[in-house]
Image (cartoon, rainbow, N blue to C red):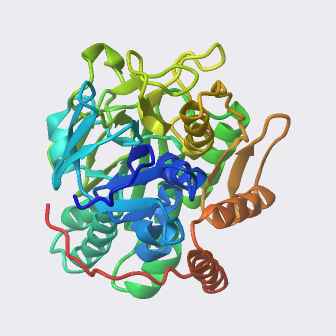
Amino acid sequence: MNIPESTLPRVVVVGGGFAGVQLVKSLANKNVQVVLIDKHNYHTFQPLLYQVSSSGLEPDSIAYPLRKIIKKHKTTVFRLAEVELIQPEKKVIKTSIGDLQFDYLVLATGTKTNFFGNDNVKTHSMPMKNVPQALDIRSLILQNFEKAAIANTKKEREAFLNFVIVGGGPTGVELAGAIAELKNNILPRDYRDLNAQDMHIHILEGTQRLLPPMSENASKKAEQFLKALGVNVHCNTFVKNYDGKQVTTNTDLAFQSETLIWAAGVTGVPVHGLKADALVEKSNRYKVNSFNQIEGYERVFAVGDIAFMMTDTYPNGHPQVAQPAIQQGKLLGKNLLRLINNKAMQPFSYKDKGSMATIGRNKAVVDLKHFKFGGFFAWFVWMFIHLMSLVGFRNRVIVFFNWTYNYINFDKAARLIIRPFKK
């Protein structure tokens, strides 16, 4: 792998997501050698993936090169690779480009889409967990508009214009709102030979309300906002099957649709080699103690979405969102330095900064500890927080410019089929 020789302790970090990047930053230019490994050469700001899917942003505005993040880190190295096996007793990891010795190993591999064993849905639906998948959804939406414009029958046309989103969490709600804006603002102008009223957006949620992790107030407001945009909301509804043409559910509802977007859950991405009982089988997350050490291992850690830290407040582990990952990565960096210097580590305590979701133009919901609100001010807060959270000044400027342009012109400028998608 051509890693520079060093007498410093080597910390290998697998994964360049929120947790991995924060950990690497906290170890920058300290007395450790850091090796960051990821199968992509960029960090993705996942909360804005839905805007790439719906033509609001180009992918390079929410992605940032990992090598650029570490360019001033004198003792940090990046390698583009996939980790295939951990040999903890030898302190070795096997990767797609060779083997690597470690002193401390941190797994920040995150999650992937969970289809809950439904192979048909997995084969025919569209997940949205990374940039290529978001671009596939963007291409499919635009291709469906083009196909609808030349469809021979009304039934065929409606199937191309029928969009089903499974999962009423923040991702599903935000995507539904963004696609509704395509229907209301773009379709009537770009596709004058189509009737926008023939386009239907359905969001299916298996529980009794949208945004189940958030307050009931947020759920009610989100449903009101979506319905005002023309989105059909179906709660207590889950998908039984999808063959690429028809969606069948546990109720009498069935949809003829060429597009089913799956945002209904995630599962961890563990690496082979650790003991089976170190994993929570249901969620594929590593059991960790309050210092993020994986159960049964002193020098192997897990942070972010892949870490299952059970507490009284979070008996099912911390929420698999950005803030726990960022906070764990930051603290673990300090704890590794403490461990190396034979000092006591500090236990992790999650500081919940609140939850939020946006539902189209001027509409969002925000849940803070003592304050819950929705509407324009919540939308403004959502925009500011997400803008400031982006990695890199350039990305912030580009996203701000795009948002300003889109807001003034009721437009989504990235309506490009760069890479046609084939099912």
Q: Give the residue drawn at x 31%, y 13%.
A: 277
Q: Which residue lies furthest to the right in this view?
A: 370
In the displayed structure image, the side of residue 414 where residue 373 appears, left or right:
right
Image: 139 above or below 352? below
In the displayed structure image, the side of residue 385 where residue 42 appears, left or right:
left
Q: Taking the image as drawn, is residue 142 in sight?
A: yes
Give residue 137's position: percent from left, percent from top: 31, 63
Camera-side residue of 5 and 250: 5
Q: Taking the image as drawn, is residue 54 in sight?
A: no
Give residue 201's position: percent from left, percent from top: 42, 55
Q: Give the residue drawn at x 54%, y 46%.
A: 170
Give residue 42's position: percent from left, percent from top: 39, 65
- The quadrant in which residue 216 appears is top right
- The quadrant in which residue 12 appears is top left
In the displayed structure image, the side of residue 346 where residue 321 appears, left or right:
left
Q: Which residue lies furthest to the front in this view?
A: 7
Give residue 384's position: percent from left, percent from top: 72, 64
Image: 43 above or below 312? below
Q: Give the residue drawn at x 24%, y 49%.
A: 125
Camera-side residue of 240 and 37: 37
Q: Give the residue drawn at x 57%, y 59%.
A: 29
User: Total number of numbered labels?
Assistant: 0
- Please state, as top left, top right, bottom left or bottom right, where the C terminus lies in the image: bottom left
Image: 54 above or below 1? below
In the displayed structure image, the side of residue 202 where residue 419 appears, left or right:
left
Camera-side residue of 7 and 403: 7
- Please state, as top left, top right, bottom left or bottom right, where the N terminus lies in the image: bottom left
